[in-house]
Amino acid sequence: MMIPQLLWDICFYVFCGVIAIQLGYYLFYFTRLAFYTAPDRQTSMEHPVSVVICARDEAHNLVKTLPGILVQDYRTTHEVVLVNDNSTDDTKYLIDEFKKSFKNINLIELTQEAKMISGKKFPLSMGIKSAKYEIVLLTDADCTPASEHWIQKMQEQYQEGIEIVLGYGAYQKRPGLLNKLIRFETFHTALQYLSYAIAGNPYMGVGRNLSYKKDVFLRNKGFSSINQIPSGDDDLFINQVARPDNTTVCIEPEAHTISEPKTSWGDWMNQKYRHYTTSKYYKPGHKLLLGLYSLTLFLLYPLLAVSIIFYNWWIPLAVFGLRFLVQAVIWYKGMKKLNEQDLWPWFLFLDIWMFFYYIFTLPAIWKAPRKNWD
């Protein structure tokens, strides 16, 4: 049975609609990060800072990452709050050794599991409540600051009215395709949450590099409303408390953190499943915004292929070319801002890859998240 030409025409028109929506995201939102310039500040203050890190059996990571945090070039009062959450390895002994040389370590020992609270929300809550200072700077045990000015750069974003600072948590650059895919997914996520925040619509942050005021945490009763969800101590909390007037970003390369990337496909997918199980709890407007972008990106290449085969091939290619050019410029500028510019020569492959990525991560919709916070 012959498929009527009208159906192929409709496919082409839908394809044009998808391109229009994608261009809307790129031109209204993603340009915000690509062309972002930090506002000039009349005054620069240095605030006391509490760096909070939770660790469970992380001795092998802390021995590598703690020195970069403890030797920060920050002369104003600051502390490093280390929450040792029921570790069975040498974490406690390692921290005790560091305490001999660094007197600003505040060790919190947890020896019992929190009932009815999954994930790392309980140890993180204990760390934040034990922090001596109002500005809390969060990172993970496997993260290293990209420079000795990390604390300085993140805390100086606190101008009048600002209560939340969103940073960028990068992954180490290693050889291999998997490393490129992990780093690209990290960049692609940051392109969204940082751009939306700059545009006045903040919806998430990443715990690898995130700061907020202790009062925000206490005023909103911490994680009490999301304690039953294994993940979400970073993105869901920020989704609840961030507003256009109390949130800013810090994207300077010196303010990044760098983490060890996963080395196997299975480990990475499990990590992504766990992260995506929280997105269903976002505010409805954010779910709509993110869902529409993902849907149009998923449909783009199948509709392009159908339109090329069954329509006048040069017209859909011309329409696609418009997005291609806009995307190339914005990705180049955005990747340069986040020190990921080595990924840019791969950008067409990585854009096509997103179609398959959405297929691979689809099980996150129904897969139950793990209870641990690893």
Image: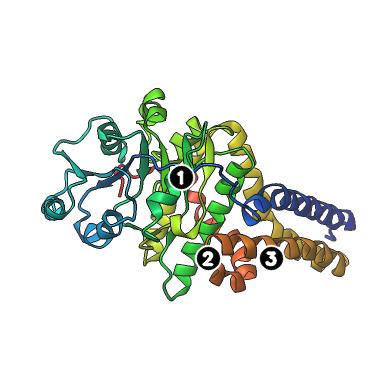
Q: Is 186 in front, or is 130? A: 130
| Mark earlier in primary sequence (2, 1) | 1
Callout 3 crowding tier (Cα within 10 Å): few <14, some 14–19, many ≥20: some
> Which quarter of the figure is the N terminus placed in?
bottom right
Residue at screen point 38% across, 38% down: 233
Q: Residue 156, which numbered label? A: 1
The amino acid pointed to by label 3 is Ala
For marks 3 and 2, give the CA distance.
14 Å
Q: Is residue 294 above or below residue 330?
A: above
Residue at screen point 75% across, 60% down: 323
Q: Is 356 in front, or is 88? A: 88
Residue at screen point 45% across, 59% down: 254
For marks 1 and 3, give the CA distance.
32 Å
Q: Is residue 245 above or below residue 181?
A: above
Q: Which residue is mark 3?
A: 328
From the top left corner, tell me how far across and down residue 62 is, in percent: 23, 57
